[in-house]
Amino acid sequence: MNNRTTFPVLLAAICLALSFFSCGPSGTEPLPYIGFPDIDPVTGDTTQHQIRDFTFIDQDSQVITNDYFENKIYIADFFFTSCPSICPTVKAQMLRIYEKYQNNDQVAFLSHTIDVKRDTVGKLKKYAIGLGVDTPKWRFVTGNRDSIFAITYDYVSTALVAPDAPGGFDHSGWVVLIDKERHVRAYANGEEEEEVNTFMQKIDQLLTSYEKPEKTE
């Protein structure tokens, strides 16, 4: 099966996971846990889907691991700097989110390039500055290609090398909300402004959930 055939199949599976785990009433209901949970076949106990340990290099040549986002929620996406299709639109929406939360210390951003061969540290730095982002709040990372492609699964996203696709890659345009415990809690199509508006409401909801005082006996 070639990449052009595989991508729609993967995307369909991902959409099924997103729709299944994100169903339920809106409003005051807690945000769902999205992804592929592990269910113990004996006890039936559920372990919620989480982002794995990772190590990448950012636009300032810093090593970025999960520890960088300790006690923060963050918004993640996948892109490449020479993308001629969806990336400019998605990044414009990411900038909207960034501008809303740039003064909130509990919110961070993580963008993974899927073109690790061409997107060097220097190129990522230039790209970030071109967006008007020169702050530790938003990390643009590169690293081992297999590691980056593998972690798309954890973000319930997808990316594939596809020579016939614009720019040589097929990838989804999801923006993904991760909570302080590495769980995926919301997503949006980064090409759709209205979806991103709703997504930002979910960011607010998640932030508010951490502000609630603990119950006392």
Image (cartoon, grey):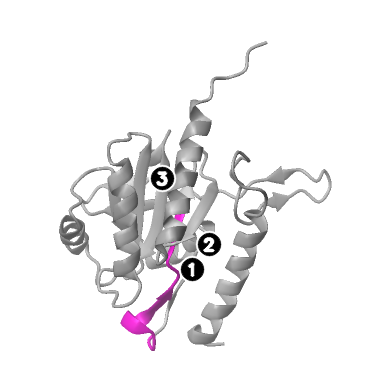
Is any atom of residue 66 visible in this view?
no
Callout 1 amino acid: Thr
Amino acid type at circle 3 is: Tyr
Quadrant for the C terminus, please: top right
Residue that numbered label 1 is attached to: 158
Region in magenta: 163-176
SS for dot 1: loop
> Gap in Å between the C-alphas at discs 1 and 2?
6 Å
Among numbered discs 1 and 2, the one appearing first in the sequence: 2
Residue 18 is inside the magenta segment: no
Q: Earlier in the sequence, mark 1 or mark 3?
A: 3
Residue 30 seen in the current view: yes
Q: Residue furthest right?
A: 42
Q: In the image, which disc is placed on residue 153?
A: 2
What residue appears at the point 53 percent right and 32 percent down from the top-left corner?
A: 209
Image position of 198 with respect to 28: above or below: below
The residue to which callout 3 is attached is 74
Callout 1 touching callout 2 (CB < 8 Å)? yes
Crowd band around label 1 with a 10 angstrom C-alpha radius: few (<14), some (14–19), many (20+): many
Q: Amino acid at mark 2?
A: Tyr
Residue 28 at x, y percent in the picture: 60, 38
Q: CA distance from mark 2 to mark 3?
A: 17 Å
Vertical arrangement, residue 117 with respect to residue 6, above or below: above
Residue 3 image point, x, y percent: 49, 83
Distance (Cα) linking label 1 and label 3: 18 Å
**Which residue appears at 42% of the width and 56% of the height?**
196
